[in-house]
Amino acid sequence: METFFSFLEKRVDDCSSLLCVGLDPHMDDLKEPTAASALNFCLRLIKATAPYAAAFKPNAAFFEVFSAEGWTALRQVIDAIQEESDRLGSHIPVILDAKRGDIASTAEAYAMSAFENLGADCITLSPYLGRDSIEPFISNPEKGVFLLCKTSNLGAGDLQDLILATGESLHVHIAGLAQTWNTKNNIGLVVGATFPEALARVRLAAPDLWFLVPGVGTQGGDLETALQAGLRKDGKGALINVSRSISRSADPRKAAAELRDKMLGVRHSGTGARNIAPESRFTDINSQISNNELSVLADGLLSAGCIKFGEFTLKSGMKSPIYIDLRQIITYPELLGQVAAAYLPLLKGLKFDRLAALPYAAIPIATAISLQGHYPMIYPRKEVKAYGTKAEIEGEYHTGETVVVIDDLATTGGSKFEAIEKLTSAGLKVKDVVVLVDRQSGAKESLAEAGYDLHAVLTITRLLDYWDKMDLVNKDKIHETRDFLKKE
């Protein structure tokens, strides 16, 4: 059965391109403020870039502004794309950028307008009203939709980064829903290149879907980073939208060709996602969480008293200006859920059979991770049970399985080695250790020397930088702590 994305993939193969050319006739770019001028602007771009375009994306707003004449011009633009398709012998899909979203009966009218009256192949939609609001657009498998997921604008995080009761961010939840709803291979997601960390998380949540990726060029998104984070394993799945960088160039045809070739180079090189193993593809990206997630966790840890500033005597006898006690997290269920959710992007990039939580602080954290990620869990006891089963490791496991060690804090790595020894003595394999906070006191280096990889949701450096910038901690204490950590 032919579907929208089977058409798109055929076009991608025909032109060896992932470029979507945005048709945005900004008033400032027109010779005169008329629908006819907007039409001519788009016709020149279509003619120049069609050989390199996997798709075209006209933005309805720039035509609607001209009332009825604008709608006529929009239809003529879509007709012109069809004519170029016929000339090239390869159908170039048209994605109408309209961002519709309304109740089902209204959605039916919008769908008829976009697909039957205008002749578009696909449309951008808001998923905010739920599945029934997009059903009229996806009833025909040959017509597609891109649902707004994590958009490229600066204010995207106001809503899209909100943490749900499940512990996952709203944009990740939308990605998961879209993956489930895509029964006819005609649902994709809009994910901006300006937030590569989110792009990588969404790819993990929706491994099969096509992404429409705006934000490269004028908005500051990096093309290579976006491809590394957004491509599927088959080297497809990310349609990179570029508009002003092409339309405002001295030679739009040359600009489109160069972009096509650059994308092709990334897809075929060692830096392309197609040739990157899942663990290496996402670990580096996700070790730096988004600014919104950083603020949620950093504020939560500080207000819960998990990280304190003052004068404290450490186990070693040293005097420290900072004290980290992540056991406090269990008193705050919402924070515990947020902490667990922050581990998930890192874990989804690793290969393992079970979580292995270190007692005692990491056990509740790992339990929350297990509930959210549906990972089976075990934990090595601090002391061998002296009665009953006399177990050294609690929970079911099988010899030869790989476990990922979960802990709350990494300092020197000593406690990690003790646990790893117990786990490996039981016939389990360990490669990765994942913690909430890396105190940056040598654990990463010590573990690496022994052949283990340490992954941290947060580093103490980034936390200090955030609290300093937000004036949440006395600057003298921040300075004192930085000096202390350098001397450790």
Image (cartoon, rainbow, N blue to C red):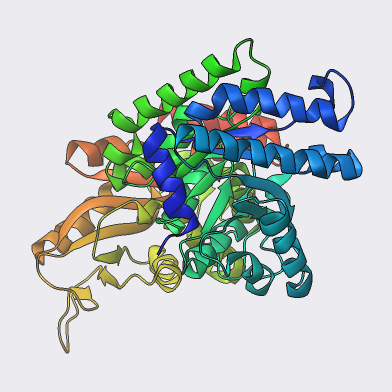
Above or below — where is 129 with respect to 170?
Answer: below
- Give how far across and how far down residue 152 sits, in percent: 64, 40
Q: Residue furthest bottom?
A: 388
Regarding residue 199, the answer to whether it shows in the image is yes
Quarter of the rendering occupied by the C terminus: top left
Which is more toward the observer, 34 or 65? 34
Above or below — where is 30 with respect to 444?
Answer: above
| Left or right placement of residue 399 versus residue 74 in this view | left
Quarter of the rendering occupied by the N terminus: bottom left
- Give how far across and how far down residue 156 sits, in percent: 69, 46
Above or below — where is 207 with respect to 221?
Answer: below
Above or below — where is 439 with respect to 431?
Answer: above
Which is more toward the observer, 136 or 355? 136
Residue at (66% x, 41% y) in the render: 79
- Snapshot quadrant of residue 69: top right
Residue at (72% x, 32% y) in the render: 24
Q: Residue furthest top?
A: 250
| Left or right placement of residue 18 versus residue 357 in this view | right
Number of marks: 0
Residue at (15% x, 82% y) in the render: 390
- Snapshot quadrant of residue 220: top right
- Give how far across and how far down residue 25 sits, in percent: 76, 29
- Give how far across and how far down residue 339 sits, in percent: 51, 59
Which is more toward the observer, 222 or 293? 222
Regarding residue 222, the answer to whether it shows in the image is no
